[in-house]
Amino acid sequence: MLKRFFLNALSSFIGAWVAIVVLGAVTVMAFIGLIAKLGTNQGTQQQVSKDSVMTLRLEGELDEVSMPVDFDYTSLLSGNIEKKQSLTELVSAIAAAAENRNVKAIYLKCNSLVAAPATLNALRNALLDFKESGKPIIAYGDILSMGDYYIATVADYLYLNPAGNVGLKGLGGATPFFKGLFDKLGVEFQVVKVGTYKSAVEPYIHEHMSEPARAQLDTLYGNMWHIILDGISSQRAELTPGKIDSLINEDFIFLREGKYALQAGLVDGLYYERSLDSIIASKIDRKPENLNFIDPSLLVSEEAMLMGINPRNQIAVVYASGEILDGGGVNTINYERYVPLIVKLAENENVKGMVLRVNSPGGSVFGSEQIGEALDYFQSKGKPLAVSMGDYAASGGYWISCCANRIFADELTITGSIGIFGLIPNVEGLMNKFGLNMEFVSTNPQAAFPSLFKPLNDRQLAGMQEMVSEGYDKFVGRVSKGRNMPETKVRRIGEGRVWDAVTAMRIGLVDELGNLNNAIDWVAGKAGIENYEIGRYPQYDSKVWDFLPDLLEMNMKTKLKGVLEKEVSPEMIEVVARMLQRKHVQAMMPEMKVRL
């Protein structure tokens, strides 16, 4: 037995070093390719010269803020490494373009941007602000997805490829249900929760959505869809909300070619892309050959160089994006990273206030509480704290938001979900598939509690329920204190229910509809400062070694794949592996992808 242990340890040690050597070799090759690519771009550096047109490419995924590139060795080998665009950068560039006299227009090149509704709305509102400069916006797409079209409707001129279409379909979200998958794995989930609408546990114990969960989503999506319809119709004179719904439901406009979109008033003209240079030039009274198309990143860098810096007055903008995980990576909210950061900002005399930008569906109850307490400490220093909500600020995301002095939300933000659940996996069936059996010997019945390898008994489940109920009471108390709201009302609007921001403001969970800049302005006013620097946090220093932990997870995923053979996609295996690594007690909203 001891010999086998040392052999396994030695094989793991050798395997780890082989992985490091392989990763190092691949990284060197990737860097060589990157340097070569950069070399080919020498001599073509852009400048913001006269007759410049800023091109916004509405394509790929749009992140809240620039993050380190998240890749693994397979993406390196395939060359599939791409830095995503960030909302923060694009909004800043749009504001800079409005002020820069060399920028004559914005060109929206639509190619299926992927983002949640609130992110798209924030970008759209930035473009609406740009229009106040009197400069035109020209939009074009070979095919206009729903999200592209929602943004592009702000354009002064909206064009479509004659062979293309407008993908108006409505608003919806997909919630995956994993019970069948876990049944194949031999994994059973035992649930304790508080809240009729706390439906985040349903995908792991049911094959279909419950009626309360469906009812709350019907209301949520319906309210958000009305906002989107009103936004489109406010910019397109021929379109009313009723007509848009009719085009979708009766005419199947998303299947019809360009001429039908033009007849319906969805677009202003049909052109092939080769004509766009001449069209854009005509709108700003210039010759096509004199146009200078520039990227947003150029304007943002120039803006940063010209910005006056006053280090004695700083407003900290802390981005809390992703799932709240204890010990999570760079794309998560890890209290071990955020708590020391918030404490440091609280004790920095140059920091006069903070905006917490929350874009999170929640997660670990423990991590949420740690971050919440650190934010309380920040406020104890007499510094104002505002929250700016992005796509989601729900469950644990609302836990860390609710005690701010002022809460701002985009009108398409999803928030609330005040509730807690416990989800304890029993992997006894999975272990049997590997031929493993766990035997326990202990002095007390609860020594191995909770065990992943056998089901909980009734007394243990009752103990878990009591812990979850106490956690919910703490959550309710925090919301009651932060929102100056009776606990009876918090419980009435809690129950794990998610709310759209407009309704959330009406019931007292949100103070004001607005964006990140509105929150920054409010903090500056509350702090009594006019000239200040904006500090953006966390500041990441990405190293190649950061990605080595991903290699350690490969062994689990490989075994899971072996069990499932070819029945399940790699994406589902990722979900399973992530689920089994979560803490047992969570403050998490239902897992759903809401996309336009």
Image (cartoon, helix red, strand yellow):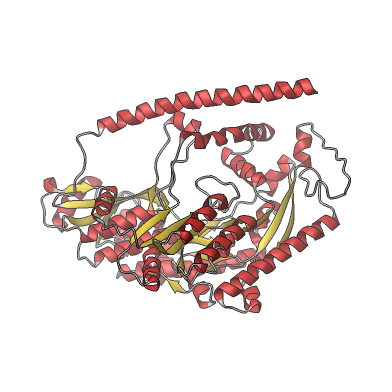
**What is the tally of numbered marks visible in this picture?**
0
Locate residue 62, reporting x and y percent: 41, 51
User: Which residue: 74% across, 61% down?
Assistant: 467
Quadrant holding the N terminus: top right
Image position, residue 355 (x, y; %): 44, 63
Q: Residue at x 69, y 34 (%)?
A: 563
Q: Is residue 421 left or right of residue 94?
A: right
Whether residue 318 sits left or right of residue 397 in the image: it is left
- Is any atom of residue 167 visible in this view? no
Q: Residue 222 placed where, x, y %? A: 51, 68
Near-viewer residue (391 or 308): 308
Above or below, 476 relative to 4: below
Task: Give how far across and how far down residue 231 sits, in percent.
Answer: 37, 68
Left or right of 310 in this view: 187: right
Q: Is residue 19 above or below residue 482?
A: above
Q: In the rendered view of the protein, which quadrant contains the C terminus?
A: bottom left
* Residue at 82% over, 37% down: 438
**In the foreground, 72 or 402:** 402
Q: Quadrant of residue 37?
A: top left
Q: Is residue 486 visible?
A: yes
